[in-house]
Amino acid sequence: MRYAYYPGCSLHSTAKEYDHSLRAVCERLDIQLAEIKNWFCCGSTPAHSVSNLLALALPLGNLALVQKMNLTEVIVPCPSCFSRFKSALYKVENERELSQKMKAVIGSSLANGIKVCHPLEIMSSESQLDRIANLKKQELAGLKVVCYYGCLLTRPPKVAQFDICEHPETMDRILKAAGVTTLDWSYKTDCCGASFALSKTDIVLRLSNEILEAAKAVGADGIAVACPLCHLNLDARQEEIEATYGVDYNLPILYFTQLLGLSFGLPPGELLLRKHFVDATRKLKEAGLHAR
Amino acid sequence: MKIDIPMETVSEFADIIKETGRFGVDWCYQCQKCTSGCPVSYAMDYTPAQLLHATQLGLSELVLNSKTIWLCASCQTCTTRCPQNVDLAGTMDELRIIAQRRKIRAKIPEVPAFYKSSLTNISFFGRMYELGLIALLKLSTHNFSKDLGLGLKMLAKGKLNILPSFRGALAARRIFSQVNSWEKK
């Protein structure tokens, strides 16, 4: 099936490996991605902290571009963007007056009936899970990961409408189908400090430390993520966290799409594993990955 | 016996919050679920439940001058768990918006500085240009050494684009100027 694709700013810069691995995996799963031409930033946290109108106009403006492509579903892999899109749709659907105003602000009709989907939702359908199991070429059962969903994929549930909000299983199901061992843990939807990455880094270090500690405590070899900001906080800041708290984690943080790609036998180079700060090579080898 | 429970708030400030975002700040009965679940409450000067109570009482000076409004990570845990359906994370947005419009000196200035630098960046480039954001943020906070090592490593790993993209810039600029003119109305 063909979907509009909104990568968002991170997937074009700090999280290129998420974009690359998602595209590679989608190709194998027959999910066609048509990137929206001339998409722009969804506004993320800064917009909703500064102006209500702006916070709605930026995602709605992008959805209007989807409508022009004559597609009805858009894939949004970044949970921060996903949350802004969903929340803008929720607001205009529930407040008539607001939707009239927004039409004037974005200068085009509001995108009606466009569905915003996260790749985890699409890949966890029964048929896709079967496909994933059939595409499995590389044994990865020795690799034990915890799935970390973060805040905005599931919260608030009436807006996100994604899985069970306090204990999601979608990513676990997908990775299990691909032959990866996923462990249960209590920090699936805890906050990593998110957008304080550049402004209040001490908060990020503390919250992300708790997440890494919890992952280590259940015996995980790595953490699977679906969010570029969580990835940055857990991976790029891991050395700083270890130094601040006097601990040693050495926990590779992998996008779930990279794990799927590895399971499908795609070369690690194509999945841009080298972009990570914490090297996953050794743990992957120990888990039985021999492809180079 | 019929008991009439007044549904109106007693403070004008609470009414402003209610009107702008339609959040029922007066529904809170102080169960503290928001506070227990809040990942950042340890760093706040008032807990989320205290801040909400102060908002109900109309203590606008206290609320808008608190650290709490800037330390909210927008993780939505409070909004998700509130048994009274108070959108507390949404209320925090409103409070930050009001504080910025009233030009109140933020207790945690790095946070609104980050918002401002990000939005200036997006309104110009259309998509976030990280190096530009970092430069703007450093100029506004005068903290030039912060994360320098990390930034260089990210550049080396090709995680930061050297040049900005201007795709989408026109459409984004149009939206920013429309929003500006609507907000002046």
Image: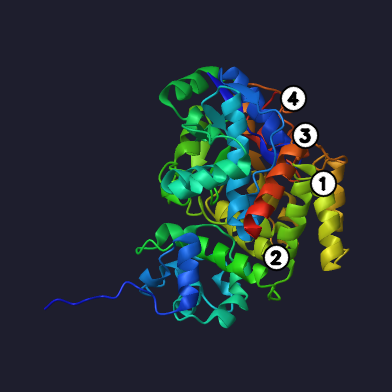
Looking at the image, is mark 4 or mark 3 nearer the viewer? 3
Provide the secondary structure element on which disc 3 rests. Answer: loop
Tell me: B168 left or right of B19: right
Residue B134, position as x, y percentages in the image: 82, 55
Q: Residues within 10 Å of mark 2 (few under 14, many from 20)?
A: many
Letter of the chain that mark 2 sits on in the rendering: B
Looking at this rendering, what residue extends furthest in the front direction?
Answer: B185
Residue A110, position as x, y percentages in the image: 53, 36
Amino acid, disc 1: Met
Q: How is the model colour-coded?
A: rainbow
Marks 2 and 1, Cα distance to the nearest angstrom?
Answer: 22 Å
Confirm whether circles 4 and 2 share one chain.
no
Task: Compare marks 3 and 2 and give the one earlier in the sequence.
Answer: 2
Confirm whether circles 4 and 3 share one chain.
no
Marks 3 and 2, Cα distance to the nearest angstrom?
Answer: 27 Å
Identify the residue position indicated by label 2 in the image: B111
Looking at the image, is mark 4 or mark 1 nearer the viewer? 1
Identify the residue position indicated by label 3 in the image: B167
Say which mark, if any, is on residue B154. Answer: 1
Provide the secondary structure element on which disc 4 rests. Answer: loop
Q: Is residue A141 visible?
A: no
Confirm whether circles 3 and 2 share one chain.
yes
Q: Residue at x 40, y 45 (%)?
A: A164
Identify the residue position indicated by label 4 in the image: A292
Judging depth in this view, the residue of A290 and B137 nearest the camera is B137
Task: Compare marks 2 and 1 and give the one earlier in the sequence.
Answer: 2
Tell me: B154 left or right of B83: right
Residue A142, position as x, y percentages in the image: 57, 34
Amino acid, disc 2: Val
